[in-house]
Image: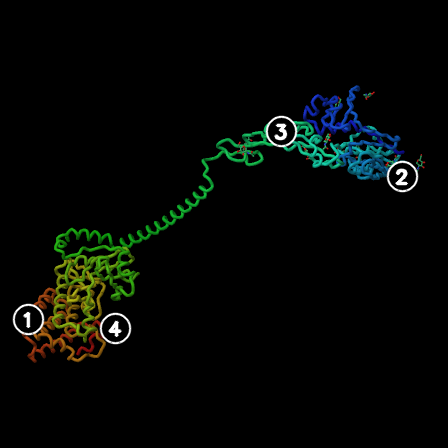
Amino acid sequence: MAMSLPLIFLQLLLAWLLGAAAMAASQALPGCENQCGNISIPYPFGTREGCYIGSQFLVTCNTSNNSPKTVFNAEYDRGDDFTPWMNLNRFPISNTQNKFTAVGCDTYAVVNGVRGRKYTTGCLSLCDSIDNVINGSCSGIGCCQTSIPKEVRSFNITIQSYDNHTNVWDFNPCSYAFVAEEAAYNFSSLDLANIQHREKLPVMLDWAVGYEPCDEARKNQTSYACKENSECYNFDNGPGYRCNCSEGYEGNPYLSNGCQDIDECMISSPCNMTCRNLPGTYNCSCPKGFEGDGSKYGSGCRQIPSKRLPLVNIALGISISMLVLLLGGSWLYWGFRHRKIIKLREKFFEQNGGIMLQQQLSKRDGSLQSSERHGSVKSFEIFTEEYLKKATNNYHESRILGQGGQGTVYKGILQDGTIVAIKKSKIGDKSQVLQFINEITILSQINHTNVVKLLGCCLETQVPLLVYEFVTNGTLYDHIHTRCRSSSSLTWENRLCIAIETAGVLSYLHSAADPPIIHRDIKSNNILLDENHTAKVSDFGASKLFPTDQTQLTTLVQGTLGYLDPEYFHTSQLTEKSDVYSFGVLLVELLTGKKAICYDRPEKREKFSHVISEGKAEQLKEFAIVAKGCLEVKGDERPTMNEIAMELQGLKMVEKHQWVKDKNNLEETRSLLGEVSVAYSDGGGTSISAAYDSMTNHVISPFDGGR
Ligand SMILES: *[C@@H]1O[C@H](CO)[C@@H](O)[C@H](O)[C@H]1NC(C)=O
Ligand SMILES: *[C@@H]1O[C@H](CO)[C@@H](O)[C@H](O)[C@H]1NC(C)=O
Ligand SMILES: *[C@@H]1O[C@H](CO)[C@@H](O)[C@H](O)[C@H]1NC(C)=O
Ligand SMILES: *[C@@H]1O[C@H](CO)[C@@H](O)[C@H](O)[C@H]1NC(C)=O
Ligand SMILES: *[C@@H]1O[C@H](CO)[C@@H](O)[C@H](O)[C@H]1NC(C)=O
Ligand SMILES: *[C@@H]1O[C@H](CO)[C@@H](O)[C@H](O)[C@H]1NC(C)=O
Ligand SMILES: *[C@@H]1O[C@H](CO)[C@@H](O)[C@H](O)[C@H]1NC(C)=O
Ligand SMILES: *[C@@H]1O[C@H](CO)[C@@H](O)[C@H](O)[C@H]1NC(C)=O
Ligand SMILES: *[C@@H]1O[C@H](CO)[C@@H](O)[C@H](O)[C@H]1NC(C)=O
Ligand SMILES: *[C@@H]1O[C@H](CO)[C@@H](O)[C@H](O)[C@H]1NC(C)=O
């Protein structure tokens, strides 16, 4: 047996109307009823003429019963009991919210759409046992569903069974089929037996105004249904259009002033702090001292921590501060470096005995006041490293005057144009440093015309630098041995003067200086000559201060081979007589023109004649006697420097007209010279060579050819 379900749907339609426009109290035209019982009737619907937009929107309200009923001006056609027929004329069935449903286990149902779009569709529902069905699911087992197409305004339903429910009779004697709101029907297995407990199911109907789309309808403003602050949209389930309030508005778009502005600030409070309602929208803002968009869904409002600078200023600020950092960093770096350099300089200064020297100098300055007044002494200066670097053109090679065991001597030009000699010790040689300090200490105490003047020093470098007066004419050694044959060669008188001057210096050092000083390295190399052939004794590096209460000093043997006192060499006992010996060698050198150490074959005696023929016989003889005395093997037997100086001074006084003509006299001198050479050789030379031989395995025989 097949059975269809008659559904009362008009009431249900109004339920939809209620849902669609539930909010506003006044939804009808002024003076029109907007309710039927508890069912609201919004415009364009109306209960009497003048209250609706068109005749099809007339709603008849029957409140005679307890429950109010609204009846549309719709044709309601009913066929026979088994083929329900619906014709809703103006109102198409909502294709989105309704479904065609059939319930049964031996059922097929067909729905025919008419009066709009023609269609036929249906579904099949079967099952063998009630246990097979699934509650809530209309997938074809006990219940099947299918969609309703668009623009359906009327339909009829046909239900059929294959087997008269014979096989399922005990649990499903009937079949059901209906069109209803999808959400309103929930299939249950109980429905297979009897669906009567849900007699009424809602159907959703769509409606629209007009018969044309929005753009056409807008052309006739008198008939156009959408009022202020509303929007028109085309109806998609048939001809006509619908209206909707614009965003930010709510109400009935078909009424004048029906769309009212929504006060979002009141309803949803979308702002964090200050909210201002505007037509259709709202404005969030932040009070003074706050920043942000003010929206709860945006950045909100944040308290401004401090007066914020504009972006440009920030960028500027950042770059300036970076620059300052950079400059500051480099300033610090250079400052640090500078400090480091200064510290290093101070360290060297201290290490080089600078403080001691300063004390000595300041002490001396007091005592020097008087002599300075006479203009004879230029005060000792302490130079800076930088200053000397400039003066020597950064120690350029072209400025090198000489290079020796102790270091290098550079020619320097000071800022006032003074030419100086700057002695730079070899780096890393501690003993050299000590010699330098020694030299400074000694020279700072000497003030003698025939001593190379020490103008100053620099103690800021690793090894101290000494600044001397510049002596123009080279060393005595050069004059005797290298320039021998040139015209600038020394005359006998020059030689005598040099001997006298040197003797004067040594005499001064030994007796006048306090404490006495032993030079220790008298040699032709250390006697400098100026343009007038005036002797200047230099190189006090090896010199020793000689305390007066001691007559001899035990030291490490130091000196130059050939000039070295043999007694000192053997005993290491340093006395001022060691200088006397070296001076004796120097006298012989002056007299003979021979080097202190000569590896050549002996030269002929004629060699001497250059000097001898020039000099006065008496002078030469006396000179040779003095030299011989100096070269005595035993120091005690040598005269003192004072005596030697006096004697040489006396030689100069020998009258000029006594020219050497006497052959005997000359021979006498020659033999004496020979004797001197022998003494000279026997006295020191051989023994020194033997000593050196045993020390170095090198045979050095300084005067083996003297005879
Ligand atoms: C209207 O009132 C009836 C009875 O008072 C009630 O059953 C029904 O649910 C109400 N409808 C609405 C939409 O409130
Ligand atoms: C209102 O409904 C009742 C029954 O529910 C009916 O008898 C009456 O005729 C109806 N009135 C109108 C005006 O349709
Ligand atoms: C479906 O639900 C009903 C109660 O609503 C219950 O009695 C019945 O057993 C359920 N059927 C199935 C197959 O779950
Ligand atoms: C339909 O009923 C089933 C059980 O009977 C339930 O789980 C489901 O949530 C219901 N669905 C709706 C839409 O009411
Ligand atoms: C149902 O509607 C279709 C289409 O209009 C029609 O052909 C058919 O005869 C109708 N069925 C019944 C039983 O009226
Ligand atoms: C179903 O019932 C009808 C009427 O009672 C009958 O004419 C028809 O033959 C039956 N069909 C079957 C398959 O039993
Ligand atoms: C505009 O609509 C009004 C009311 O429906 C009608 O009287 C009028 O003729 C229409 N005007 C035009 C131009 O269609
Ligand atoms: C009409 O407005 C309502 C509420 O503002 C909205 O939910 C709906 O989606 C709108 N419909 C169309 C077609 O814009
Ligand atoms: C505003 O926002 C801040 C953080 O964004 C929050 O702490 C504060 O509670 C908010 N104030 C209000 C009134 O919502
Ligand atoms: C919000 O209000 C502030 C001040 O009243 C104004 O400057 C701003 O432009 C407004 N914003 C919007 C989106 O209207």
Discs 2, 4 touching: Cβ within 8 Å: no
Above/below status of 278 relative to 638 = above
Disc 2 element: loop
Residue 603 appears in the rendering: yes
The image's mark for residue 693 is 4
Task: Compare residues 565 and 617 and report the one nearer the observer.
Answer: 617
Q: Position of residue 16 (x, y in %)?
A: 74, 29
Return the residue at label 2.
162
- Write down the residue under mark 1: 654
- Mark 1 C-beta to ligand 9 under 8 Å: no
Task: State which quadrant residue 120 falls in.
Answer: top right
- Is disc 2 in contact with disc 1, using a CB cutoff of under 8 Å? no
Query: Which residue occupies the foreground of this view, 275 or 497?
Result: 275
Which quadrant holds the C terminus? bottom left
- Using a 10 Å C-alpha cutoff, classify the residue at mark 4 as few (fewer than 14 neighbours), some (14 to 19) or many (20 or more): some
Say the numbered circle drawn on residue 261: 3
Could you say where residue 205 lies in the image, as x and y percent from the top left? Answer: 77, 32
The earlier-in-sequence mark between 1 and 3 is: 3
